[in-house]
Image (cartoon, rainbow, N blue to C red):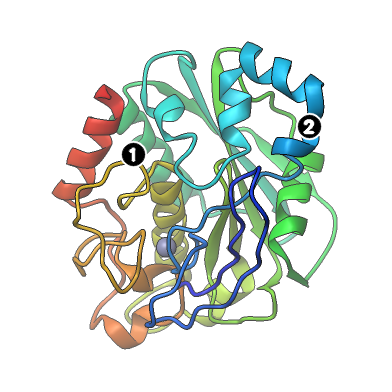
Amino acid sequence: MSVGSDITTVPGRSTTTASTAPVGSGARPAVGGSGAGARGGGSGGGSSGSGAGTSASAANPVATHATGGPGDLAQDLLRPQPAPKDILELIFQSDAAPDTRAVDHVRNTLASVSGKSVSTPRVAINGGAQNWTAGQLRQLADDATAQKQGGGQAVIHLLYLHGTYGGDTSVLGITVRADVVAVFQDQVVNSESPVASAATIEDAVTMHEVGHVLGLVDLVLHTGRADPDHPGHSRNKGSVMYWAIDSDLFSQVLSGPPPVDFDNADLADLAAIRRS
Ligand SMILES: [Zn+2]
């Protein structure tokens, strides 16, 4: 799934928005949906920062990387230094809290691929359904967070919200910055079927978006194995990084429930990024 996409370029370049990419067609970027490797621009980052931003960057590379696009924080999350701890910060609206099983699965997977301890602090927020823009999602993460990026830790902000990504009900999840993921819980529930429970879909979507944050597929490495029609995604229907996972199209493309795990090629890439 994913279709969606907002494509924002890396700070310093012009920001374009994007187009929604019809799933299936190759589009771009935002990784989140299935779009692809979208580069989420940092909110406010980049050139607008002026001198202060520059010195902050030098002092806190993790914070600087976090303002980039999907994959830009991958090395900080996977390597032992400069962030010995990883944080999955769960930011959720009322009645949109993440499923405990999905959270445990993602936490255990991140701990396994990084070799680090991973905590999952929770932040309840107000507000209800709306058609979210990528910029609003980034701002929400920055306003709601209780975590500092850097200072020995790397943080992924996971937003669990009501509403849609830009009015597109097919988008279940999206990655809009190196450290910001959104899961649209109403759409997850609407995608439930006899073969895929909402909890399983939520698990798959969350893992998929975290995979983008970790640089999959080929957002960091250049292995050539990404699906050319769906940049940022796997061609393997058995991988959670398969392109249809972040959209409600998975039910049309897969015969069973969505995969919830990285495949061996994904794991090999994560290990290579960790070593790099
Ligand atoms: Zn995707």
Residue 229 location (% of width, % of height): 31, 74
Q: Residue furthest left?
A: 264
In-front residue for pair 257/183:
183
- Front residue of 51 and 43: 51
- The type of residue carrying mark 2 is Gly
Which residue matches tag 2? 49
Ligand 1 image position (quadrant): bottom left
Pick the residue in front: 57 or 240: 57
- Which quadrant holds residue 79? top left
Within 10 angstroms of label 2, few (less than 14), some, or many (20 or more) residues? few
Between discs 1 and 2, the one toward the N terminus: 2
Circles 1 and 2: CB distance less than 8 Å?
no
At a point 30% along the width and 59% down the height, the residue shown is 240
Residue type, label 1:
Thr
Left or right of 14 on screen, residue 269:
left
Residue under the image location 31 percent in, 58 percent down: 260
Residue 6 pos. (x, y %): 60, 65
Q: Which mark is residue 139?
A: none
User: As drawn, is 274 to the left or to the right of 264?
Assistant: right
Q: Which residue is mark 1?
A: 109
Tell me: residue 31, above or below residue 151.
below
